[in-house]
Image (cartoon, helix red, strand yellow):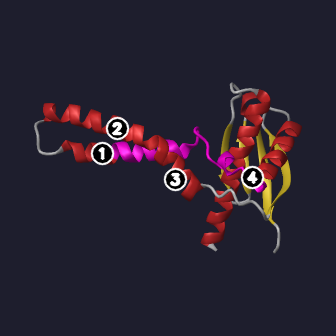
């Protein structure tokens, strides 16, 4: 049961990233979008026409099914921030050592900066292997509901798994 829920969230997370990538390609890179995956789909927060969202979800689904798995990994994903925070925190703890307070500060700063640099590729790896799954061969779009207004507008993209 838990494994099925996690698998659904990972697939929807991949579709969310791919959809945002397609939307950004159509609307321009300065478009303001935020996504959040759930077990039965994902939310897109941003002011855009529902038809544009529908077209982009369908295109993203088709492209992922054709093997464009790179669309499942996003440089703007919160996973990258989480990895950076964890690495910076752990590296700072390690850098503290037994020195005086003033001697620790440069070590902590250097360790934190190196951790944040390392987080870029590690965040992408975490997405690729842990938080997303681009295999959407049995994922189907159920529908899209729109809510909110203006900058508070959101779209709930609902998905399901086709029976095998």
Residue 88 on the magenta segment: yes
Q: If the image is split into quadrants, where does the N terminus sit?
A: bottom right
Q: How far apart are the two marked residues, 3 and 1, measured between alpha carbons?
A: 18 Å
Instruction: Left or right? Give the position of 1 relative to 112.
Output: right
Answer with mark 2 or mark 1, whichever residue precedes in sequence: 1
Q: Secondary structure at mark 1?
A: helix
Say which element carries label 3.
helix
Q: Residue at x 56, y 51 (%)?
A: 127
Provide the residue designation for mark 3. Answer: 126
Q: Main secondary structure of the magenta part?
A: helix
Mark 4 = which residue? 64
The span picked out in magenta is 65-89
Q: Residue at x 82, y 73 (%)?
A: 163
Cβ–Cβ under 8 Å for marks 2 and 4 = no
Q: CA distance from mark 3 to mark 2?
A: 18 Å
- What residue would you read off at disc 1? 91
What secondary structure is found at the residue carrying circle 4? helix
Tag 2–tag 1 contact (CB < 8 Å)? yes
Which residue appears at 51% of the width and 43% of the height?
80
Q: Is the residue 104 above or below the residue 64 in the image?
A: above
How far across and down, in percent of the image, does residue 24 sit? 73, 33
Q: Decide if residue 137 is in sight here.
A: yes
Do residues under tags 3 and 1 come within 8 Å of each other at their CB atoms?
no
Circle nearer the viewer, 4 or 1: 4
Sequence-wise first label, 4 or 3? 4
Quadrant location of the C terminus? bottom right
Crowd around label 4: few <14 · some 14–19 · many ≥20 (10 Å): many
Separation (CA) of disc 2 from disc 1: 9 Å
Please give the residue where the numbered disc 2 appears in the rendered image: 114
Nearer the N terminus, badge 2 or badge 4? Answer: 4
């Amino acid at each position: 049961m838990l494994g099925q829920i996690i698998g659904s969230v990972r697939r929807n997370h991949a579709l969310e990233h791919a959809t945002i990538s397609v939307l950004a390609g159509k609307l321009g890179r300065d478009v303001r979008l935020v996504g959040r995956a759930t077990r039965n789909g994902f939310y897109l927060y941003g002011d855009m026409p529902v038809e544009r969202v529908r077209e982009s979800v369908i295109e993203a689904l088709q492209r992922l099914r054709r093997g464009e798995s790179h669309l499942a990994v996003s440089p703007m994903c919160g996973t990258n921030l989480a990895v950076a925070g964890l690495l910076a925190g752990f590296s700072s703890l390690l850098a503290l050592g037994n020195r005086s307070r003033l001697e620790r500060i440069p070590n902590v700063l250097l360790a934190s900066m190196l951790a944040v640099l390392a987080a870029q590729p590690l965040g992408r790896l975490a997405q690729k292997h842990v938080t997303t799954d681009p295999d959407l061969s049995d994922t189907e779009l159920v529908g899209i509901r729109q809510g909110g207004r203006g900058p508070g507008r959101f779209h709930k993209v609902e998905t399901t798994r086709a029976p095998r």
